[in-house]
Image: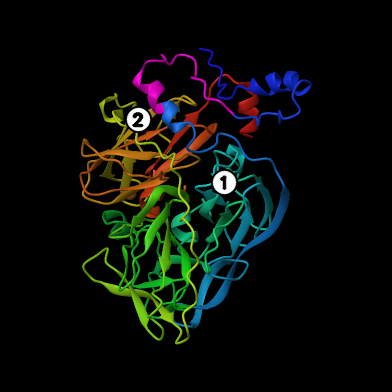
Amino acid sequence: MHRSSTWITRSRALLCTTLIALNSGCTPAPEKPRFSLPEGVAPDSTEARLLEEFYPAYSADAPTVTATREFALRAAPTEADIVDEKGLKVWAFNGVVPGPTFRVRIGEKVKITLTNDLPQPTTIHWHGVRVPNAMDGVPGVTQPPVEPGEQFVYEFVPKDAGTFWFHPHVRGSEQIERGLYGVLVVEDLKPPPYSQDVVWVLDDWLLDEDGQIYPHFVTRHDLAHDGRWGNVATVNGSTAEQLIVKPGERIRLRMVDSANGRMFAPHFEGLEPMIIAVDGMYTRRPLPLEHFEISPGNRLDVDITIPADSGGKTFTVVDRFTRNQFVLATIRVEDVDAVKSPQFEAPRNEHVPYWEGAHELDVDHVYKLDARSGGPHGIEWMINDKVWGEHEASALPPDRWTKVRFQNESYRLHPMHIHGQFFKVIARNDEPVDEPYFRDTVLLKRKESVDVGMVPLDWGNWLMHCHILEHAESGMRTLLTVEGENEEKKESAD
Ligand code: C2O
Ligand code: CU
């Protein structure tokens, strides 16, 4: 079947050049892309309406490159003064845990040279970034693993501004647990003028009696539960992270859950944070942060104005995902005169579709999540009764509206992540819901089913897996292939 994927038609530019001679006031029309339906979609169909609504939400293409930013990342064992300020034997990027935060601007090309000085092969996956498929860091799918002593160069132009993170995709359950992760912030062309732009990497650690990382990974216990949960939770490697602010400041706080299995639900006592982005992408409008569950893989950006009269106060941020609440971090307000709060409209994406009526459409792909006993770890987590290696890839046609159902048949948690794509939750347990944002990772609770709608724009073989790393390691991974007949697009995926 041949399907051209011309989403973009340019016709106004031509009209304008003919007018230029007659009318000096005619500026050439900007090359405004216009939506055209992919072949095979009837103009009066529900799908046509959903596609039309989706089309302005985010771009199919990378922006024009304005500059190249080069970074080096060296993965190696080291000792870090984190957790309780005692030397913790970790594996780190550039000697620090969390790894570096790379900040680039949308339009910049990112070029990162990875040097592997670990005792194991590794790769880097750019979680949430719509990269060319060959840059996605999945061993055996998009690249061979990078052997100890070797290097690999990742190069891509981010298509979206937002909060992203990176981590290995070889033995993630061990490598990420030992400290290998970092953050990629892609700034807007004009970053909103927050007083501070702060990153909090949330993690937890399972330490043994010697205060070192418990060296047994993917245990039967981890697999029988929601992965490896630690006995110490940290923010930016610290059990007592403190953000220092001035009264009146307006903060953009970017949170990332880099844990193997732990979910977080941060409550900011005495403050009124507004959610402005989920998984890197702006929400339709700012949303009050009531109780938001951040699963491994998720990012959450909030906009917080520190009350002008709070000089000298300390606010606590408490995790309430489980019944055992604990203080995650604190926000200490200096005892000084209030600064004038920056006044601007919080960033948003008004084009996040509502996709009304999507619930009535058929499900294109169902993924049942469950476990069986057996395999090298004693328990295997499966997708549709199969483990990684036993599946055929699911074919997702590019540019078409697609509905995917995750069906949790188990009593455990599964944050399901799709590489290279964003999706929107449209139903839970068959009840329509409108989450006013896209995601790349969605948490399924026990026995829950979640329907998501998506329009795959990025070509290639993309991994889909549970982001509880032990579940993924024991089998809960499969592939989605987004591909059509367009040779140019096929090449651009490499
Ligand atoms: Cu954080 Cu395969 O992903
Ligand atoms: Cu899982």
Q: Residues within 10 Å of mark 2 (few under 14, many from 20)?
A: many
Q: Residues within 10 Å of mark 1 (few under 14, many from 20)?
A: many
Residue shown at 35%/58% (left/top)?
261
Q: Which residue is mark 2?
A: 403
Residue shown at 39%/36% (left/top)?
353
- Mark 1–mark 2 Cα distance, whole angstroms, equals 26 Å
> What type of secondary structure mainly makes up the magenta span?
loop
Indicate the position of residue 200 as horizontal and vertical percent values.
46, 67
Q: Amino acid at mark 1?
A: Gly
Q: Nearer the viewer, mark 1 or mark 2?
A: 2
Residue 212 within the segment the image draws in magenta: no
Residue 298 visible within the image: no
Q: Viewer-proximal residue, 80 or 329?
A: 329
Q: Give the mark nearer the N terminus: 1 vs 2.
A: 1
Q: Which residue is mark 1?
A: 137
Would you place residue 44 above or below residue 93 in this image?
above
